[in-house]
Image (tube, rainbow, N blue to C red):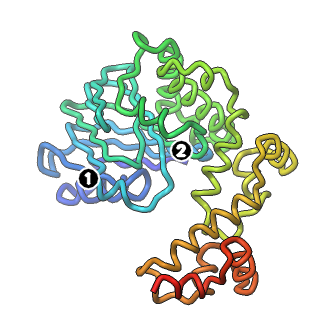
Amino acid sequence: MSLVLRSDDLPPDDRIEIIREAIWTEVMPVEISYDRPGPQIEVVCRLATAGSVNFSSARSTPTTLRRTPALARQDHDPKVFLAVQVSGTSMFAQGDNQAVLRRGEMAVYDSTRPYTVLNTTRTDLHYFQVPRSELGLPASTLDAVAGLRIGPDNNPLAAVVAPYFDTLGSTDVLDHPTAAALVAGPSIDLLRALITTHLADEPLAAAPLQGSLVLRVQEYVRMHLADRDLTAARVAAAHHVSVRHLYAELERAGVGLQDTIRALRLHECRRALRDPASAHLTVAAVGARWGFVDASHFGRVFRREYGMTPREWRAASG
């Protein structure tokens, strides 16, 4: 079901803080400023979820949203946003790129770097947020497209993609759980195709999403490395494939899932054991933080990998 926030339903003097809190907790931490006092603000904001796709729609008086460098550095699951302009004019800036959007135009940006969204007039926008790990695109591709204007005049898919996402945001389809779950995958596919087409990256655009499974799995593992239940079953379920299919694709790419998880966890343990910020933790606690719940097992695999025990490695730093 959707969560709808209307400024008319909020205490005038508390509107800005309530809206800010909703955006921070349900969408993404950003600094929000308006060109007028709280009692004069007019906002209608709708929040919904379709599988792993988070949706928000905002009709608002002029506002500025800034994801500051400090906010971008905070630990979080990296997200990619697609903004669809419904009415009014907005400016999006990230990195060296800047885009001015009008009706039917779009922009892509991500949560790991600072960005600014400037709405100088009354605007109506849809925002779609997708985990970067599920999009399955290299960071260089996302960096290249972030902050660019995407429209029917410069991307042949824009005339299809913008109305599709506008329909998702303007109707009640996301209020129906079954329908919302079914559109999540196609929505991610469309966003991926829009980005790769815009950059004229034919290999990426032509490759089916399945072809990026290994890349997406590796990114997912990195993001969930500290989770103790990071099993093949969980990884497969997160990517909507069977465990057998997951292992087959990884084997074809020469990637061992358990070997990858163990190697990455050992790397983080090795780093943490010499990090002053972790000096108060025992060796066993460091191992447990990165998924090694059995201290003896942690010691054995660490020594096999690095030729010394975790205690010896930590002591050598002194």
Query: What x and y, as percent, mark residue 88?
Result: 27, 25
Mark 2 vs mark 1, foreground winner is 2
Query: Which residue, given by chain and number where applicable, does mark 2 sit on?
Result: 132
Query: What x and y, as percent, mark residue 266?
Result: 64, 70
Query: Which residue, given by chain and number where applicable, does mark 1 sit on?
Result: 31
Three-letter amino acid code at disc 2?
Arg
- Mark 2, Cα crowd under 10 Å, few <14 / some 14-19 / many 20+, is many
Cα–Cα gap, marks 2 and 1: 22 Å
Residue in view at x 38 percent, y 21 percent:
105
Q: Which element type, helix, strand or loop, lies under badge 1?
A: strand
Query: What x and y, as percent, mark residue 230?
Result: 70, 64
Q: Quadrant of residue 115?
A: top left
Q: Nearer the viewer, residue 251 or 185?
A: 251
Three-letter amino acid code at disc 1?
Glu
| In the image, residue 76 above or below residue 65 | below
Q: Nearer the viewer, residue 198 or 61?
A: 198
Q: Which element type, helix, strand or loop, lies under badge 2?
A: helix
Residue in view at x 70 percent, y 78 percent:
303
| In the image, residue 162 above or below residue 71 | above
- Does 275 sit left or right of 95 as displayed? right
Residue in view at x 30 percent, y 26 percent:
99
